[in-house]
Amino acid sequence: MKIAQLLTARRDASHRHWTDIAAYAYLLLGVVLMFGPVLWLVLSSFKTQAGLLEFPPSLLPMSQKEISVAGYPQPLPLFTVTMEDGTTRQLAQVRRVGIQSQMVDPDNPSQQYRVAIDKRVPVREFSLATENYTEPLARFAFPRFLANSVFVTVVATLITLLINSMAAYALSIYEFKGKNAAMLMVIGTLMIPITIILVPVYLVVTKLGLVNSLWAVILPGAATPTGVFLLRQYMLTLPRDLIEAARMDKASEWQIYWRIVMPLTLPALAVLAIFSIMWRWNEFLWPLAVLTKTEVYTLQIGLNAFQGELQTQWQYLLAMTVMTLTPVAIVFVFLQRFITTGIANTGMK
Amino acid sequence: MADLKLTDIKKAYGNVTILHGVDLAITDGEFVVFVGPSGCGKSTLLRIIAGLEQVSGGDIRIDGQSVTNVPASDRGLAMVFQSYALYPHMSVYKNMAFALENMGLGRSEVDKRVRRAADMLQLTAYLDRKPRALSGGQRQRVAIGRAIVRDPKIFLFDEPLSNLDAELRVATRKELAALHAEIGGTMIYVTHDQVEAMTLADRIVVLRAGVIEQVGTPLEVYNHPANLFVAGFIGSPRMNLFPARVADAGGVAVGSEMRPIILPSTGHAVVGTDITLGARPEHIDVVGEDQADIVITLDLVEQLGGETYLYGSTPGLPQLTVRQHGQAAYDRNQRLGLRLKRDALHLFDADGSAIRIR
Amino acid sequence: MLRGATRIIDWPMEGLQRLIGERRMPYVFLLPNLAFFGVFVFVPISINFLYSVTGGPALFPAERPFVGAGQYAYLFDCGSFVDPSSCREDHFWRGVSNTLRFTAFQVVAMVLLSLLTAIVLNMKIRGRGFFRAVYFFPVLLSPVVVALIWKWILQRDGLLNAGITGLGGDKILFLSEPGWAMFWIIFVSVWAHMGFYTLILLAGLQAIPADIYEAAEMDATPRWRVFWRLTLPLLWPNLIVVIVLALIRAVQTFDEVFVLTGGGPGTSTLMVVQYIYETAFSNQVQNFGLAAAASVVLGIVLFALTLAQLAFSQRKSS
């Protein structure tokens, strides 16, 4: 759809109201403010170190054009030069001497010129500094962090899905003594964010010998009250007849859970899985407290460490930031509607 | 196949008692229908037999073995649910195979049984479909098939036809009857529809408020209702019931407008006591006013084509219903003389229990 | 294949059921979850109190001398509670005062902006799904990524300063001046989380039946009146949820601020949670008792807020 059409489209043209126009203005401002910074990050991440140091910065990643000239083994940088007679032409620079630059005509390499450096302007072209992406993968522990994050996210999500769905199953399908007490315990934990039990959880993890192990990140958050609630709410809507039919069909309680209830709870499990992936991928404070060795850093912790160490090497930092946000962005593009309705329905994040 | 014996089955939820001590014996191969108004406890009784509910008291025996404390999964019974309870994520084949796999049968045995049942129920073409791709009638048959493959000791049916439309209900009813004739298992069937009860049952169990009111073959229950409740519940339209008094030996006086009716016998009824006289709508003839026991004014005529229902009233008596064969031309407000068939009347004493007169 | 794999767990579970009986199976299903809650929530809560009444550098409570309310007394030892520098533990009170300021401005901005955005997104406009996605997108970004994105924009030679110099202004060191730093951490956290609250409010708006608005239109009700007399009262339950949730989260702010400013310049953006984290884990301090006492204080505040939320949502559902 054309932008103009999008802007002027209305449900009925007879009731044009100033609030409609204000609404579109607000939304467009929103697009710039919300997407702009991310776009700027992505564009910047493709600039060379020299490009990043430019002020004012260019919008697109640009770098100086280089050209191979016969007789010179290395490609030479290309400049637009204002000649003494006022004409301009493109010359390649062989070397610079003080405020003079020795230049050569690429079309006629035998012809050399001496040009004052303030008479020449670099010829620039759009180019992506992909080495910003490839070098951190080779030079830093970035792949290690990535692997750690993937491990934590996948394993923690699987554990979360399993134990929370088991608890939700018990709390939705059965009547048993102590059910209310168990529900209360689950609600109680809703009120205890990790921020206020940081120190004692650290002690527990130490006692279990898990400090500087990825399990220290995975285990403490595996049982989430929000997960239990979400799944229980969904399981309560399953027809009771199905469970009884399975019982009549000689299914054990575990089989009822695993072969009947779990497949039917897939939509809710998917929502919880997406949330769990987001939580785990983005988790910061707790891993920061419990992971102190570089080998076990997750992406977020690694990125935070980099931003301390690489203050002068923004090109790597930016590229790694982009790599960190890319999986989330991909998940978002494909599951946006799913996630937003999930949040709207459950009010959790 | 098996027999079932219920002894003094009680069920209460807190202060609310659902079943007040039910005794019942069902023999091998019998088709028994539990019928009663909603809330009578018939479904609870079925679920107790199934093992889906625990008894508060009493004993359940299958083939002489007590199963009172055996969980549902180990009782070897199969149940067809009102909602069918098909596993929505499994194909028709998987739905039927699920229980067999749980029983630990081999793959070829499972396949053989499923295909035989599918063949019997004309489901072979649908074995790979999911339940949501089936019509209501097909789902119903899958639910039955799921029970059949088990070769269970007893089949339990919980109002299995109530989700079908009228036409399909009649067709499926006949199929069920044929099925019972073919495989001959012990079947227990719960319904609130007395037509299903009458057509399917070897024996009907009429329940009310957690108590068995009568057990008998369909015609026994119809012809000799044990009490006022059964008389009123079985038969459609309902039996006409008149307050009456035993006039003298062999005579019953009804209301003030009616002549005494001389019966072959009034059983053990004591002269002068209040009783209730019952006459089914088809046991009332339209006659000339001179021969009539009672003269009514017609309130409403319902023409069903094959038969005609007449509703009329007379002061001092409840509205009564007359069933006439074929089509008959009557007008509203017309006066009509009625005569009760002497050999088909029912008497009930002040407690509502039937008085044996035939 | 998968069948074979699940059989492996089927058998022990079936054996267990045979052993303990069907009616005890719910406890088996509940056990793993409660074990996790127990080890990582209930035990830590009780240990937290133990920590807060003991002193010394030891990690294990048994090796820590009992000091009674000493940690709390130290924490609350202040000349004047309105002046953090008059307190013995001035960092804690800096954190409290910064957190209060941050919370006050952030929650107000958050609620107003997400309400405005939700209302605009609820209008009948083209491309609503796209715009909703735009506002929601930052919610999914990790705090570290969010902080780095803005650090890059706000740095001395960043995009924003390029804009300012382009307009003839002077470069501003946004994250090195206390006032600006506070402004930007509020701005960035609103930027990052607004989409979440917008979504809750939007769901509330969409739950208001359309015929109410049609009735108002038939009555020729002016738009502002529709907003004040219909929309706002009907949205009130969701708004309360949003306010309390925003409060609970704002009080716990840590991640973005820590990466963006590290609490600086000086202590001007130091938050309570960062104080707790550094008191417990930074190499110079490592004072578990004091950190635990501070987290008990924070916990009490959060508990009160959560109770408020439960009370409100209870009223909403009844």
Image (cartoon, coloured by chain):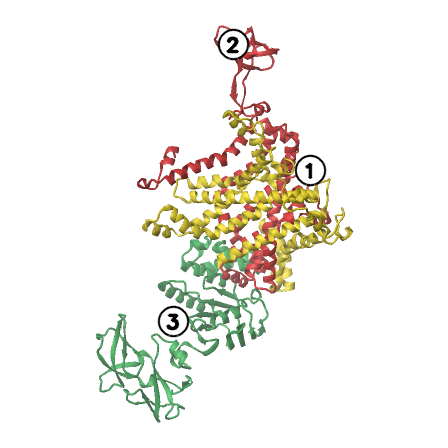
Chain colours: A red, B green, C yellow
Q: Position of residue C284 (x, y in %)?
A: 73, 40
For the residue marked with disc 1, what is the amino acid?
A: Glu
> Residue A107 shows which numbered tag?
2
Task: Determine crowd level at label 3: few under 14, some 14-19, many 20+ residues with C-alpha closer than 10 A.
Answer: some
Residue A349 appears in the picture as rendered? no
Gap in Å between the C-alphas at discs 1 and 3? 77 Å
Residue at the spot 43% in from the left edge and 45% down from the top edge = C119
Residue A238 location, x and y as percent? 50, 58
Q: Amino acid at mark 2?
A: Asp
Give the residue at mark 1: A295
* Label 3, label 2: how far apart the Cα atoms are: 104 Å
Which of these two is toward me, C160 or C33? C160
Q: Is residue A2 left or right of residue A59?
A: left
Q: Which residue is mark 3?
A: B195
Q: Badge 1: few (under 14), some or many (20 or more) residues near its Cα, within 10 Å?
A: some
Q: Using the image, determine if residue A34 lies above or below residue B292.
A: above
Quadrant of image for the N terminus of chain A: top left
Marks 3, 2 in one chain: no
A25 sits to left or right of A190: left
Residue A280 spot, x, y in % from top left? 60, 44
